[in-house]
Amino acid sequence: MTDDVKRRLQDAFDNAHVPADLAERTLERIEQIRTADQAGGSGQTAPAGRTHKLAEQPAADEHDPSPSIPQHRKASDDQPHLSLVAQKRPAASPQRRRHIVLAAAACLLLVLLGIGGVAWASTPYAYIGIDVNPSLELGINRFDCVADTRAYNKDGEQVLQQADVQGKSYEEALAAIDDALQDYLTQDAVIELTIVCDDRDAAARLESTGVHCLDTDQTGQVHCSHASEAEHHEASDHDMGLGKYRIYRQLVDAGMSISAEDAESMTMRELLDLAQQHGVGVAVHDSRDEEEHLHRDQEATAAAGEDAEHESAGNALETGHAHRRHTSASLD
């Protein structure tokens, strides 16, 4: 065998990774062929017990693609190459196993973060209470879609069933609810929109969209207010819409004898009229009035800031003049 052939066979065996049983069968077959070639070249017969196996194999000819093994090859020449085939894949080193474990842990962490991220984005970050006589609530997720709904009375259940808002965008859901509320919107009806959201910018955006969708005819019948998470939980514990619950609490705090059941059965207009009759000032406001008031406050703050800036500049200029006069007097 030439050195080039030996090298190529050596490389082939080095790069081969075969199962142990396949390697064993291959070795056995090579040994059979080698023994047969040696027996044929020397005029000797193959050892007993192997003759029937060799007879089953077709004789090699010029068309046989498998390479023949030279007869003059010694058994000692085969041992280094044959042992390479039979070698099993070496076990991973402790360092390699550690890398594999760390990689698997990193993949698991990414999966958990992905699942957690989806849960975070899908969980409501804001709640919108809508009270007329129907009392219902929408949970809005980070995609500004309805992720949760709750009805606090039978009318609320009917509105939610008719509007079918689950999964809709916030604006689409409010438009559908506005259509479903038409049967309850008498001439003096009041829609109380209550926002529960810690993000001030998001709360302002939710309020603006809510008023725009529920007060399409610009009648001013939509009142909007903001509530804390604690008030939200209290209203839920009393099984009352958030808007009605806030009026109920103010009536009770003012000393009125009214049960939660009685307050829940009343419309928002009836609750407001009751508070007015007993001289109870309720913290309900028209969102457009507050927006205008907030705009006036911002303008006043900006004006005060400009006045303060001008005054500060004037003081600095006067200080400079005084310093120059003092310096001139010293030189004289």
Image (spheres, helix red, strand yellow):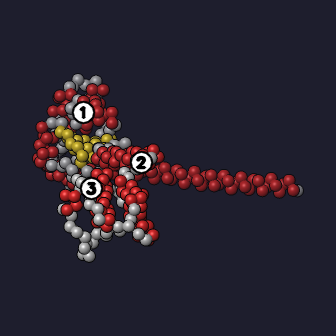
Q: Is residue 252 above or below residue 93?
A: above
Callout 3, which amino acid? Pro
**Neighbour tally class for label 3: few under 14, some 14-19, many 20 plus, Cα within 10 Å:** few
| Tags 1 and 2 touching, CB below 8 Å | no
**Neighbour tally class for label 2: few under 14, some 14-19, many 20 plus, Cα within 10 Å:** few
What's the residue at 29%, 65% (across, down)? 43
Calculate the distance from the C-alpha at mark 3 to the C-alpha at mark 2: 41 Å
Give the quarter of the image for residue 128: top left
The answer to which of 46 and 166 lies nearer the viewer is: 46
Secondary structure of the residue carrying tag 3 is: loop
Callout 2, which amino acid? Ala
Calculate the distance from the C-alpha at mark 3 to the C-alpha at mark 1: 93 Å
Q: Which mark is residue 162?
A: none
Answer with mark 1 or mark 2, whichever residue precedes in sequence.
2
Please state if 37 lies on the left or on the right of 308 as rendered.
Answer: left
What's the residue at 37%, 42% (across, down)? 198
Tag count: 3
Callout 1, which amino acid? Ser
Please state if 328 lies on the left or on the right of 270 as rendered.
Answer: right
| Tags 3 and 2 touching, CB below 8 Å | no
Answer with mark 3 or mark 1, whichever residue precedes in sequence.
3
What's the residue at 39%, 62% (across, down)? 74
Secondary structure of the residue carrying tag 2 is: loop
Name the residue tied to disc 1.
236
Name the residue tied to disc 2.
92
Q: State the image coordinates of residue 332 (x, y, percent, origin top left).
A: 88, 56
Residue 61 in sight:
yes
Q: Is residue 45 above or below residue 128?
A: below
Q: State the image coordinates of residue 3 (x, y, percent, origin top left).
A: 45, 69
Q: Which mark is residue 47?
A: 3
Q: Is residue 324 above or below residue 5?
A: above
